Image (spheres, rainbow, N blue to C red):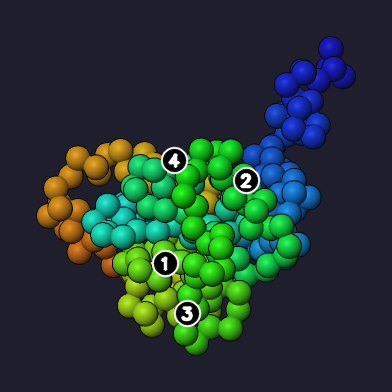
Amino acid sequence: MAFIMEKENRQNNNLPKTHPRYESLLYRHKIIEGMKNLVVAEAGLIAHGRGECLDYILGEKTNITAEKAIKAAVAMLLLAKKPVISVNGNVAALVPNEIVKLSKMINAPLEINLFYKKKGRVEAIKKLLENAGAHGIRGIYEDKMVEIEGLDSNRRLVESICYSDVILVPLEDGDRTEALKKLNKQVIAVDLNPLSRTSLCADITIVDNIVRTLPEMIKIVGELKKFSENELKKIIENFDNKKNIKNTLDLIINYIEKQKEDAFEILGT
Ligand code: ATP
Ligand code: MG
């Protein structure tokens, strides 16, 4: 009967799977759940909303420019001597299983790094990641950490990031990206905003939603693991981050133009 929803449709806080924006609603719920469990900061909800808005004008898909950046990023991570993955609350809430899987595949520790500290938050994120199979998570004990010079936010406290050569920074703050670059680290960003300070100063900028990027990275690691060092170096050499960001901005402009035409047709103007 039309009025009776299937049982599985009623799960996930009554989110009907048939809803045209089911995926987007599902991730909203993960973020809200994360906030209730202390994993996500209140401001994390707003950051997610900013991300959604940008995802909208990117067509809510992994574009060709993101694909290119993902391939270069995976090559860089596989060539790294000491890669690290920085994790914040939103990342842990949205993709705990995928971030743990990637960390194991490329042999890079996960390091919790937060802008907003609150009693019990680090422990809540640690628990969530451990439930997803993580071991040896960094960024838990302050006595093991050092401060990044020239950075005043809580994000200045780092552990293995300090000794790393390549850092994957999903949903990062621009201040810290700039500080990490000053320390000559190679930075790979995942950020839906191609114009953020993080995006503009990272070595490789993946303009895409973390929920799509991670499964894609995991797939590409499987493919590139068979490549020689020289082949991986070639992939990086052939990648131009500045050009790729410019191409991403053109993609957005073209997408909006197309949306405008479609809207005009509906509006009859
Ligand atoms: P910056 O500090 O780099 O200039 P900002 O201050 O505008 O950026 P922050 O809150 O510091 O933004 O960082 C959060 C970034 O994460 C934003 O650019 C936002 O678009 C992006 N973001 C939010 N959700 C996602 C997501 N699911 N996937 C990828 N990026 C996301
Ligand atoms: Mg910021």
The amino acid at mark 2 is Lys
State whether residue 89 appears in this view: yes
Residue 238, image x, y percentages? 21, 62
Cα separation between marks 3 and 4? 28 Å
Q: Which mark is residue 101?
A: 4
The amino acid at mark 1 is Ile
Is 101 situated left or right of 5 in this image?
left
Q: As rendered, which of 60 and 220 lies closer to the eye?
A: 220
Q: Which of marks 3 and 4 is nearer the N terminus?
A: 4
Q: Residues within 10 Å of mark 3 (few under 14, many from 20)?
A: some
Q: Which of marks 4 and 2 is nearer the N terminus?
A: 4
Q: Mark 2 points at which residue?
A: 127
Q: As rendered, which of 166 and 118 lies closer to the eye?
A: 118
Q: Name the residue under label 1.
A: 161
Is 110 situated left or right of 153 in this image?
left
Residue at point 25% right, 44% down?
224
Question: Helix, strand, or loop for circle 4?
Answer: helix
State the quadrant of the N terminus: top right
Cα separation between marks 1 and 4? 19 Å
The amino acid at mark 4 is Lys
Determine if the C-beta at disc 3 is less than 8 A from ligand 1.
no
Cα separation between marks 1 and 3? 10 Å
The amino acid at mark 3 is Ile
Residue at point 65% right, 53% down?
123
Q: Which of marks 1 and 4 is nearer the N terminus?
A: 4
Residue at point 35% right, 66% down?
164
Q: Which mark is residue 148?
A: 3
Quarter where residue 128 is shown: top right
State whether residue 57 appears in this view: no
- Tell me the mark number nearer the camera, choosing from 4 and 2: 2
